[in-house]
Amino acid sequence: MSFEKFKLDEKILAGVVAAGYRKPTPIQAQSIPPIMAGKDIMGLAQTGTGKTAAFVLPILQRLMQGQRGPIRALIIAPTRELSEQTHEAIEQLGRKTGLCSTTIYGGVSISNQINRLRSRVDIISACPGRLLDHIGRGTIDLSSVEVLVLDEADHMFDMGFLPDVRRIVKHLPAKRQTLLFSATMPGEIRSLADDLLRDPIHIQIGDSAPVMTVSHTFYPVQTEQKTALLKDILEKTDTQSVLVFTRTKSRAKSLAEQLNRIGHKVTSLHGNLTQQKRKQSLDGFRDGRYEVMIATDIAARGIDVTRISHVINYDMPATADAYTHRIGRTGRAMKTGDAFTFITGQDAELLHSLKKLLGEKLQYQNVEGLTVSPSASDSMGTRTAQLTRPNNGRKLFSSRALSSRRPNQRSFKDADRMSWSSRAPQAA
Ligand code: AMP
């Protein structure tokens, strides 16, 4: 299938070609025709599937006809970074259309936004809080909105934004097209969809399992050994861009400082930073100035950095869904990637859910002197590091993805490492 089949305006097709998209991803193939036909959509899609273009292209197509000037499309997203990315996708795909897009989110000057809103704007990418602020001040007119997109709706729910979203929707025309995208479908999102969508087309790309192009390696480790293990991995692994997740902002900051001190090009992304600093971090990570970014969940939600080769869960995420979101930062747009997860005794319950989710894709990894036995993971909190298991002859650590992608780079010294399949008898 090609993009020509959608019969998009040639100015939009020019944007698709300029973006380098050769053929539609599955979610684009399934959603673009019904969205262009004016249907409401409930899209259950993993991150990195190309869902932004799946809704941006039909929006551009619709807006090519009719009046320019009033805000006719509103995209609501949980984070500033995601709003920026959507805006950038609109600018890129719609560069020849003459349609105008802008972002609305907090942490930056509201008067600049008010000025921008006074000029012609066709499409808004917004976060709920600042958008409500504009609504309250009367500085935005949403009475002409024809299409509403709720992107990463499950994240908005996690972040407590659903009441805000419902308040915003009251300011939109009842007659509109509504598109809801979510990577997971908790009950609250279903009920939001029941309230807001009219006779929606349900589209599901894969299930809630993490993208299959990612390998999943777990390191059973004592909490106090995590930093040493991270340093060891960074030193010995072929990486391109590495995104490391911590549970807290302070840990993200201090870990970044520690890695910086030993010469890594590292930045951090967390909620304590100003919007300007967050942007600098993300831009630097995107363009390769920083090889490592240490982030918290909230800050890293939805970020699109296509070249991330490794996601490292320094701290285990809170839920299996959060794991899916985190590792969705790598393996994007059909590329491959590796997810490494440090597990401690406190993580036994979630480990159990992840084993069910990942099945045979879950592999354990031992690093002599730094990890503990995977079979000890349920009681690891009280165990001390030990373990020397025989190598079972399996390919070690450095994944197929890396070896095929970067053949000339130094390869991981796997002599020091051992791995287990989750099916192996010694696995937990
Ligand atoms: P998304 O899931 O919308 O965040 O998209 C993930 C990445 O896939 C982005 O970097 C997009 O630019 C890229 N992408 C979207 N659609 C396509 C396509 N049809 N072909 C290749 N890359 C794409």
Image (cartoon, rainbow, N blue to C red):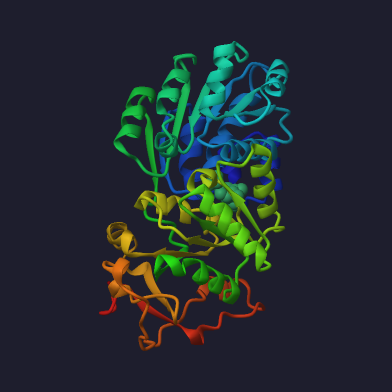
Q: Is residue 143 visible?
A: no
Foreground residue among 236 and 363: 236
Query: What is the x, y in percent for residue 339?
Result: 47, 63
Check the picture and name the quadrant holding the C terminus. Answer: bottom left
Along the horizontal axis of the image, is 386 left or right of 19? left
Q: What residue sits 54% from the left and 13% below the top?
A: 136
Foreground residue among 277 and 154: 277
Foreground residue among 134 and 235: 235
The mark tally for this picture is: 0
Query: What is the x, y in percent for residue 111?
Result: 70, 20
Along the horizontal axis of the image, is 18 left or right of 36? right
Q: 174 above or below 211?
A: above
Q: What residue sits 44% from the left and 67% below the top?
A: 224
State the image quarter where residue 153 is shown: top left
State the image quarter where residue 287 is shown: bottom right
Query: What is the x, y in percent for residue 389?
Result: 35, 86
Q: What residue sits 43% from the left and 45% below the top?
A: 45
Q: 288 above or below 46?
A: below
Along the horizontal axis of the image, is 288 left or right of 145? right
Q: 375 above or below 41?
A: below
Query: What is the x, y in percent for residue 418?
Result: 42, 82
Q: Is residue 385 visible?
A: yes
